[in-house]
Image (cartoon, helix red, strand yellow):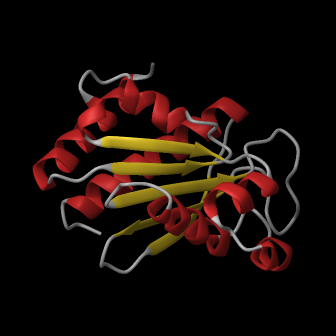
Amino acid sequence: MDDALSNLAAELGAALKARDYTLALAESCTGGMVAQAITSIAGSSAWFDRGFVTYSNQAKIEMLDVSSQTLEKYGAVSEQTAIEMAVGALKNSHAQVTGSISGIAGPDGGTPEKPVGTVCFAWTELNKPSSTTTKYFKGSRQEIRQQASIELMARLVDRLNGND
């Protein structure tokens, strides 16, 4: 595992433990990469509740309550879908904070409007407003997935530390 992922996972764990929070994830294009980094940390079961790998639209609908209308109107790779994924992960878990990722890791699947490397993120927690962002990463499929995983964990750490 990459040192950046491992270090961020440990930092995220410390931030969650300091608040007595647990985390749930909703991952699409990263295929569970963030959950893998987290569960590589001994003792992570104290602060990691569960991960949803919802690669297909049907899985997003069934497991995270993403609206089929949202998927039809905005697509799977959209901030609208990412926020519904994060909210769905919160609703369908025992966590107090969640993060989601949906993107186009390539090498195919991009369009002029949403090129390969487009990744949408969302974060939400109990009794606080959610936030979203879209990033554009360059590189191979693996590099895009890794950059997206790092971005999600870094933003969760920032949010938990009040820096978002």
Q: Nearer the viewer, residue 140 or 99?
A: 99
Coordinates of residue 102 in the picture (x, y in percent): 65, 55
Is residue 140 visible in this depiction of the protein? no
Q: What residue do we see at 72% from left, 58% from top?
A: 62
Q: Which quarter of the rendered picture does the N terminus lie within?
A: top left
Q: What is the total number of numbered labels drawn onto the structure image?
A: 0
Coordinates of residue 139 in the picture (x, y in percent): 67, 37
Q: Would residue 3 be found to the left or right of residue 31 on screen?
A: left
Q: Would residue 74 be found to the left or right of residue 34 on screen?
A: right
Vertical comparison of 87 with 157: above or below: below
Coordinates of residue 164 in the picture (x, y in percent): 30, 69
Vertical comparison of 89 with 34: above or below: below
Q: What residue do we see at 77% from left, 50% from top?
A: 116
Q: Quadrant of residue 65?
A: bottom right
Vertical comparison of 142 with 134: above or below: above
Q: Quadrant of residue 119?
A: bottom right
Is residue 105 visible in this depiction of the protein? yes
Coordinates of residue 18 in the picture (x, y in percent): 11, 49
Q: What residue do we see at 80% from left, 56% from top?
A: 58
Q: What residue do we see at 48% from left, 38% from top?
A: 34
Q: Nearer the viewer, residue 159 or 45?
A: 45
